[in-house]
Amino acid sequence: MEELRFNSSSSNVFKIGDSKNAILSSLGQPDSDEYFYFEMSAKEGRLLKYSQNRILLKQDKFYTLTIKDGSIEIGRSENYFKVGDTVDKLYNAFPEFSSKPVSNGYINIPLRSIDYDMECTRLIITLQNNQIVKIMRHDC
């Protein structure tokens, strides 16, 4: 299920596991680029900040992110959604979740890939008044 694609107004798409160069090609230079240490796995990483948005790289590969504004879109099956959109745009990309209840203002979408199949890897979408206000790809 992890066929997510991310892009900005440049239309250059990047995916989970892509290099830092793919992100820079899509989003440009970050506002800041900081060293980050993953204590649980003892791996080095980078924290890229784009305004309110955060992208974590683990060993120079796109690992996870938190999106708090509408400058980064998430797509699946050619359907994209972003912060500020109504939940209907999310359901266009993930129709299998349109009948599931929203719990405490969140929609949790489990993510799987051939390389990574952990139960706690998920897309967490925060809603307020039927509108997307935050998107986070959580990983264990």
Image: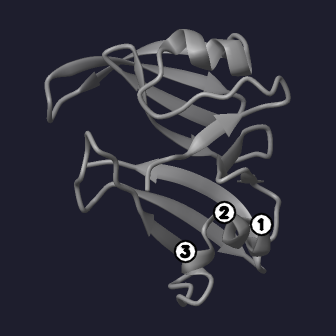
Left or right placement of residue 130 versus residue 66 in this view: right
Q: Position of residue 3 (x, y in %)?
A: 51, 47
Numbered tag placed on residue 106 in the rendering = 3
| SS category of the residue bearing label 3 | strand
- For label 1, count other residues whose C-alpha is less than 10 Å away and answer few (under 14), some (14-19) or many (20+): some
Residue topped by disc 2: 93
Closer mark to the observer between disc 3 and disc 1: 1
Task: Name the image quarter holding the N terminus.
Answer: bottom left
Horizontal side of 110 relative to 96 (left or right) equals left
Label 2 Cα neighbours within 10 Å, binned few <14 / some 14-19 / many ≥20: some
Q: Which mark is residue 89?
A: 1
Q: Kindly identify the residue that appears in the image at 73 percent across and 13 percent down.
A: 28
Secondary structure at numbered mark 1 = helix
Above or below: residue 137 compared with residue 62: below
Gap in angstroms between the C-alphas marked 3 and 1: 15 Å
Q: Nearer the viewer, residue 36 or 63?
A: 63
Q: Dot 3: within a 10 Å radius of its alpha carbon, few (fewer than 14), some, or many (20 or more) residues?
A: some
Residue 131's spot in the image, x, y percent? 78, 71
Residue 117 in percent (x, y) is at: 24, 52
Q: Amino acid at mark 2?
A: Ala
x then y, percent, for residue 88: 77, 74
Q: Is residue 43 left or right of residue 139?
A: left
Viewer-side residue, 138 vs 39: 138
Task: Tell whether label 1 touches label 2 (CB within 8 Å).
Answer: yes
The amino acid type, in three-letter code, at marker 3 is Tyr
Q: Which mark is residue 24?
A: none
- Label 3 close to label 1 by CB (< 8 Å): no
- Mark 2 or mark 1, whichever is nearer to me: 2
Q: Earlier in the sequence, mark 3 or mark 2?
A: 2
